[in-house]
Image: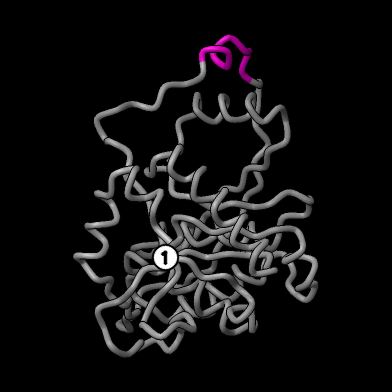
């Protein structure tokens, strides 16, 4: 959830070049994880020439910027146009059948993904709303939507549309921002008059009602996850 004053601040910073979508759904536990998944669709639905970057707001912005620069450099070397970071699972086999094409069992980390315009232009068969429809079809027969469903849905979607083999896959590296440190707004932005209204596009998600069927989420290697979040900046710079 984003406070109204924060929305106004973001709108001013973007100087009008911003779109808001508010997702609503039928009452089903865990529907917030589907909303988390919807951020991914921006990567191939964005109509501009800009490179789309998806990041976690709880990660260090400085670290993420360095990682984005690194991914762009690696994409140029590999002659590819979209990159996903990943985490490794401690399970030998993927019960969902949608793991990434790596030697080890791994899945996309939604904390950092990057798609360039060339990647979007190469998949004109994808239209706005395809990912939403895909998620709805999977989740209607599911009871409670579990934590981690967003990344499982993304991997399933990429496999279903044969997009996974052209993606550059890089281990995810991040530093979780200190929760005790408040993010300070840029002083200049505080002086701007907030817009009187914000245009919001309403999107309804048809997720069905309760059922007894469960959705399986592959588990991440705990030690690896804990180590990633505690890496010092000097160590991150040396990560390959």
In this view, the residue in front, 13 or 208, is 13
Which image quarter is the C terminus in? bottom left
The residue located at (64%, 57%) in the rendering is: 42
Q: How is the image coloured?
A: one colour
Is 193 included in the stretch rendered in magenta?
yes
Q: Is residue 187 above or below residue 25?
A: above
Q: Is residue 238 visible?
A: yes
Q: Which of 84 and 145 lies nearest the eye of the viewer?
A: 84
State which region is magenta. 187-194
Tell me which residue sits at (36%, 66%) in the image.
148
Q: Which residue is more in the foreground, 90 or 20? A: 90
Instruction: Specify the farthest residue to the left.
Output: 223
Task: Inspect this view and state whether residue 27 appears.
Answer: no
The count of marks equals 1
Q: Position of residue 108 (x, y in %)?
A: 45, 69
- In this rendering, position of residue 110 left or right of residue 175: right
Disc 1 crowd, CA 10 A, few/some/many (<14, 14-19, 20+): some
Rendered image quadrant of residue 221 = bottom left
x, y percent for residue 34: 46, 63
Q: Residue at x 56, y 24 (%)?
A: 9
* Residue 95 falls in image quadrant: bottom left
Q: Nearer the viewer, residue 4 or 10?
A: 10
Residue 1 located left or right of residue 143: right
Quadrant where the N terminus sits is top left
Identify the secondary structure beneath mark 1. Answer: strand
Give the x, y percent position of residue 182: 33, 26
Residue highlighted by disc 1 = 171
Please indicate whether residue 218 sits to the left or right of residue 43 in the image. left
Residue lying at the far top of the rendered structure: 191
Q: Position of residue 176 (x, y in %)?
A: 32, 45
Task: Name the residue at 24% across, 49% down.
Answer: 230
Does the magenta portion include 222? no
């Amino acid at each position: 959830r984003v406070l109204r004053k924060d929305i106004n601040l973001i709108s001013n910073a973007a100087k009008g070049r911003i779109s808001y979508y508010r997702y609503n759904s039928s009452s089903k536990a865990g529907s917030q994880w589907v909303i988390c998944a919807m951020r991914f669709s921006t990567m191939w639905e964005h109509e501009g020439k800009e490179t789309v970057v998806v990041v976690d707001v709880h990660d260090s912005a400085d670290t993420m910027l360095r990682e984005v620069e690194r991914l762009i450099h690696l994409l140029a070397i590999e002659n590819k146009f979209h990159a996903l970071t990943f985490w490794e699972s401690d399970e030998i086999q993927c019960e969902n059948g949608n793991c990434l094409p790596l030697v080890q069992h791994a899945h996309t980390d939604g904390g950092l993904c990057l798609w360039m315009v060339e990647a979007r232009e190469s998949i004109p068969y994808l239209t706005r709303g395809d990912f939403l429809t895909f998620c709805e079809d999977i989740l209607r027969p599911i009871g409670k939507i579990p934590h981690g469903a967003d990344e499982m849905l993304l991997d399933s979607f990429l496999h279903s549309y044969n997009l996974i083999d052209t993606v550059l896959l890089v281990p995810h590296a991040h530093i979780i921002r200190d929760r005790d440190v408040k993010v300070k707004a840029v002083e200049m932005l505080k002086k701007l008059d907030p817009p009187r209204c914000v245009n919001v596009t309403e999107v309804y998600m048809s997720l069905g009602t309760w059922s007894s069927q469960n959705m399986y989420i592959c588990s991440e290697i705990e030690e690896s996850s804990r180590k990633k979040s505690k890496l010092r900046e000097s160590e991150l710079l040396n990560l390959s």
